[in-house]
Amino acid sequence: MWRTTRSSHVVRVGSTIMLMVAATMVSVSGHDYGDALSKSILFFEGQRSGKLPPSQRLTWRKDSGLHDGFDKHVDLVGGYYDAGDNVKFNFPMAFSTTMLAWSVIEFGRGMGPDLRKAVDAVRWATDYFLKATSVPGLVYAQVGEPYGDHECWERPEDMDTARTAYAVSAQSPGSEVSAEIAAALAAASLVFKGVNHNYSDLLLSRAKTVFEFADKYRGSYDYSLGSVVCPFYCDFGGYEDELIWAAAWLFRATAAPNYWNYVTENIPTEGGNFAEFGWDTKDAGINVLASKQIVTKDSKYTDIFELNADKFVCSILPESPTKYVSYSPGGLLVKPGGSNLQHATALSFLLIVYANSLNRANRVVQCGSVQATSDRLIQVARAQVDYILGSNPMKMSYMVGYGGKFPQRIHHRGSSLPSLDQHPQHIGCKDGTPYFKSSGPNPNLLTGAVVGGPDIQDRYNDSRVEFVHSEPTTYINAPLVGVLAFLKGRPNP
């Protein structure tokens, strides 16, 4: 029991039901985006693995995973648990890191005193990824036995399941996980460029090395690591998008023409999965990043990126004739698979970033007869955030600790079990079962955690058992950090 599959399946044209109830999606809320921003960053402290620093604010969490990697004679202590379990899945962790870094790059100026904490959140991951890529010819992709872990309900501080470290190599490649780590390191190098020049250089140097490894030894970790990563984080979208994504970030960080050439030579001429973006598929993010950031005289390829980014926008707007997503009656963007709010936050982030590009270029997006301005893109993204924060039919916030009503029984081991301060005795694998089955609220508040969210009819049952709705993840929160930072500095319309 407690085995989870957090899918990110590609949605094809014509496969989505179009619900026009939410077409207007006008925000009328008065949410405190600054408070939500602070809490969305604080959440990452609750997901930390390793030796916690004196500055740890969620003090019910303690040290954990202090021997990670020792089975392979390498230090893999640190990093993040991706969700409510105790496995370190490096593929989604790297994507979350890339998005945290991008949030700081784009919107750090609007974070105020939270900026330092956001940078700390990035570094907690990059310090770990430097360890995971420290052995030449290897990239560590995961720490922990997922099946054994998912059969237990125990605190990360207590876990006694195997902490096996799994790596990809030349003989057993994993281009998607390696390239996503390279993207995370390259993006993070920009975060630290004006803060810690030596650390920034180290991140960028490692990003180049890991990207070369990912590109030279091509193959999916689905096959190299098999059931260890599937069905948990299978790469459904293929590894090619991660390679292009990493090259785009390396170009952003270096301005070296070879990375731009790599992007343009490998980008699908038909646009690929231009409407998809998340831990599995990066296509929409590539188009938005390239059309916004890359300054080149190669107008042919610039036009392709802008065209595909425009098509992405038209796939999201409720009033667009080419909309691919569904909307709940209450206005929530919905796509197939679990942890739906990952789509609401990640796609909203891209809308905000692209809106800024449109504004600077004094341009609009044409979706058939519908014209989308930069303000309209921001309005749609704001509506998704407001829904998450409480402007929804359930009248509840889906961010733990924000607002007067929020999920109390989230699918999260550490939050649902008594802390070491309250229960210093060891809680074994099956000893946590009564806590999992309890109808009582979680004893520890995982402040800032955003859960998977309601169903397409806006219904949410506050239950640990329903993990597709009640489990928080780092890749839900990471893009939300950037959107909240943007909205914090922009008054309600």
Image (cartoon, helix red, strand yellow):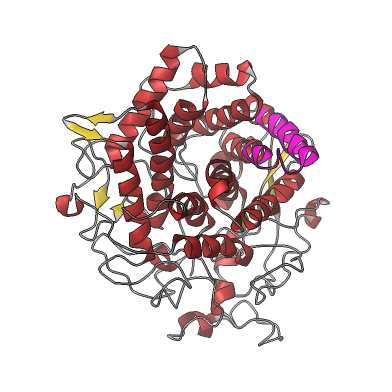
Q: Nearer the viewer, residue 306 or 211?
A: 306
Compared across the picture, whether 438 is left or right of 130 comes to left
Q: Is residue 171 magenta?
A: no
Q: Nearer the viewer, residue 467 or 325?
A: 325
Compared across the picture, whether 36 is left or right of 159 comes to left
Vertical placement of residue 464 versus 148, above or below = below
Compared across the picture, whether 434 is left or right of 381 comes to right
Q: Main secondary structure of the magenta part?
A: helix
Residue 339 seen from this side: yes
- Measured from the top left, where is residue 246 in percent x and y? 58, 32
Q: How many labels sit on residues?
A: 0
Q: Residue at x 18, y 36 (%)?
A: 321
Residue 3 seen from this side: no
Q: Is residue 193 magenta?
A: yes
Direction right: furthest residue: 73
Q: Nearer the viewer, residue 139 or 446?
A: 446
Q: Quadrant of residue 99?
A: top right
Q: Residue at x 58, y 52 (%)?
A: 228
- Measured from the top left, where is residue 478 in percent x and y? 52, 52
Q: Which residues are magenta?
A: 187-211
Q: Nearer the viewer, residue 393 or 468?
A: 393
